[in-house]
Image (cartoon, rainbow, N blue to C red):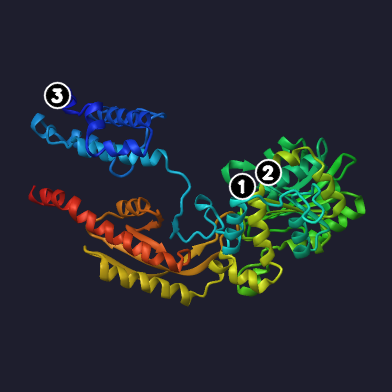
């Protein structure tokens, strides 16, 4: 049967000359179109020969209208007559080619985050402020004063302005920026403790995103790890007893992406600083999430701030700029001038340095922190976290009401209670109350509805629970409500056109 069906599969040339594909020659390179057509046809042949389970690392992966449909239809055909009814028309194949081309060249684009994960790593973590976006636009379109002194015309430091801002906000003596917090920790270890011992509590040997583990970072830096205490309890005496003539650093790592609760004990940073001063050992504090405002006064759990660490006398503090700080991706190293200046001279600093776009966006973000109220009003991450539940509810009601008016099929929607998560390795286990628009249809499976939402322009990312698609309105902007409603209306209308005949056939059978 498969040989017969293979003869009915359109040729590459026929597909390239079809009215569905011929317009694409002005949008994509011809060779790319040809290669994609061949890949799609080969995937269809594999489906009919039952070889789609064979790993094909170099072969394209197609979305919801994919090759699996051909495989299911082929397996379900009991004889040649039924097999001949499988749709392998040029129109259907061209649709797969179009989707495949879009998927191959799909880059970073605007997306709507309806998942409720506030610092969603997959969706770029912290959105930037309007001021940062404008600063980026000005920097992109023209030359800029990256490494030049405006008034003298001499060569300057790219970190001068941003260092002043960090020091004013945190109270640090000196500071500079690298490309992320892992780089900040690596540079600290390589500079201060290469070939020396670094004392760390066992409870703080964390693993961050992408399977990067603190012990591995230490090994790469040339530092020698010395574990003290137990998983749940570490005392000041554990640190003190571990100090030898080979000790180069005591490192405290904030548990920003997990919690240890119950029978626990840890050492306050002030006590570690006192120990370090007594034994002449520098203290480094990896804060991770980079809080510059005490969120506890807004009803959230206490998250150690950079200012608290600097005030405690820590020598080197490292933290992220794209988490609670709400800026672009980066890592800040701040602290005492003696140690920060030493880090600046490390040859690795050039390899880990940031470019003009990161500096521009981060400067604009940090300026807002000079006035705390301004930061709370304008930094999107903080606004999302602290938005009153009533505001989130009103946003949800507006979307629910539009859905009731616009959708053309039985798509039921309701507003229900839920919780949003911080994400991004920040405030582990803590949630914020939210409102969810719950979508359910007897005709469109939840998985397919979620897939088609992601296929929208811009893509809309939601979550699925108990057969329902949930849109978390805390992470949706006011300006995105109408976009989501329009996408749902299009999905509903398109589903009727494309699927009604299939459902009618099934009911007849």
Q: Nearer the viewer, mark 3 or mark 1?
A: 3
First of labels 3, 2 by sequence position: 3
Query: x and y percent of residue 483 in the render?
Result: 37, 62
Q: Residues within 10 Å of mark 2 (few under 14, many from 20)?
A: many
* Residue 432 visible, this orientation: yes
Q: Residues within 10 Å of mark 3 (few under 14, many from 20)?
A: few
Query: x and y percent of residue 66 in the render?
Result: 29, 40
Residue at disc 2, secondary structure? helix
- What label does residue 214 carry, if any? 2
Q: Nearer the viewer, mark 3 or mark 2?
A: 3
Does residue 160 appear left or right of residue 51 in this picture?
right
Circles 3 and 2: CB distance less than 8 Å?
no
Query: x and y percent of residue 393 in the render?
Result: 43, 74
Q: Give the alpha-carbon distance from disc 3 to disc 1, as whole Å.
A: 54 Å
Does residue 422 appear left or right of residue 311 in this picture?
left
Circles 3 and 1: CB distance less than 8 Å?
no
Per the image, the residue denoted by label 3 is 4
Residue at disc 1, secondary structure? strand
Give the residue displayed 52% in from the left and 55% down from the top: 120
First of labels 1, 2 by sequence position: 1
Per the image, the residue denoted by label 1 is 208
Q: Give the alpha-carbon distance from disc 1 to disc 2, as whole Å.
A: 8 Å
Q: Give the alpha-carbon distance from disc 3 to disc 2, as whole Å.
A: 59 Å
First of labels 3, 1 by sequence position: 3
Give the residue displayed 64% in from the left and 72% down from the top: 374
Q: Residues within 10 Å of mark 1 (few under 14, many from 20)?
A: some
Can you name the residue that lies furthest to the top here?
A: 3
Query: x and y percent of residue 338 in the render?
Result: 87, 50
* Residue 62 visible, this orientation: no
Does residue 500 appear left or right of residue 381 in this picture?
left
Give the residue displayed 33% in from the left and 35% down from the top: 25
């Amino acid at each position: 049967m498969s040989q017969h069906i293979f003869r009915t599969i359109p040729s590459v040339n026929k597909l390239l000359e079809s009215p569905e594909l011929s317009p694409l020659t002005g949008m994509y390179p011809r060779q790319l179109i040809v290669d994609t057509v061949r890949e799609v046809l080969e995937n269809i042949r594999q489906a009919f020969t039952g070889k789609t389970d064979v790993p094909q690392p170099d072969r394209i992966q197609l979305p919801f209208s994919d090759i699996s449909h051909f495989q299911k239809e082929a397996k379900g055909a009991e004889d040649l007559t039924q097999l001949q009814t499988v749709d392998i028309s040029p129109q259907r194949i061209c649709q797969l080619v179009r989707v495949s081309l879009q998927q191959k060249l799909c880059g970073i684009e605007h997306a709507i985050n309806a998942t409720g994960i506030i610092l969603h790593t997959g969706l770029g973590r912290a959105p930037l402020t309007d001021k940062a976006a404008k600063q980026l636009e000005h920097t992109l379109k023209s030359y800029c004063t990256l490494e030049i002194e405006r008034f003298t015309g001499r060569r300057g430091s790219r970190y001068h302005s941003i260092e002043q801002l960090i020091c004013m906000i945190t109270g640090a003596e000196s500071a500079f920026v690298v490309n992320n917090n892992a780089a900040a920790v690596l540079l600290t270890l390589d500079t201060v403790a290469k070939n020396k011992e670094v004392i760390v509590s066992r409870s703080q040997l964390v693993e961050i995103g992408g399977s990067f583990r603190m012990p591995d970072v230490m090994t790469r830096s040339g530092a020698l790890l010395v574990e003290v205490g137990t998983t749940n309890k570490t005392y000041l005496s554990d640190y003190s007893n571990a100090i030898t003539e080979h000790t180069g650093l005591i490192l405290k790592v904030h548990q920003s992406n997990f919690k240890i609760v119950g029978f626990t004990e840890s050492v306050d940073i002030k006590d570690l600083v006192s120990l370090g001063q007594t034994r002449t050992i520098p203290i480094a504090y990896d804060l991770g999430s980079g809080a510059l405002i005490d969120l506890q006064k807004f009803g959230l759990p206490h998250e150690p701030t950079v200012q608290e660490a600097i005030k405690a006398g820590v020598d080197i503090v490292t933290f992220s700029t794209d988490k609670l700080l709400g800026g672009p991706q980066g890592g800040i190293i701040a602290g005492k001038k003696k140690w920060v200046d030493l880090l600046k001279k490390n040859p690795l600093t050039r390899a880990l340095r940031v470019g003009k776009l990161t500096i521009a966006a981060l400067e604009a973000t940090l300026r807002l922190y000079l006035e705390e109220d301004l930061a709370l009003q304008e930094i999107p991450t903080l606004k999302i976290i602290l938005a009153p539940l009533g505001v989130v509810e009103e946003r949800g009601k507006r979307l629910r009401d539009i859905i009731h008016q616009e959708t053309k099929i039985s798509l039921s929607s309701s507003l229900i209670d839920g919780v949003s998560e911080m994400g991004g390795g920040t405030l582990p286990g803590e949630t914020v109350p939210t409102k969810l628009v719950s979508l359910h249809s007897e005709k469109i499976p939840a998985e397919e509805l979620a897939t088609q939402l992601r296929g929208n322009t811009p893509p809309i990312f939601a979550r699925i629970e108990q057969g329902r698609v949930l849109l978390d309105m805390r992470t949706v902007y006011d300006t995105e409500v109408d976009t989501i409603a329009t996408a749902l209306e299009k999905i509903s209308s398109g589903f009727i056109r494309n699927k009604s005949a299939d459902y009618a056939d099934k009911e007849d059978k």
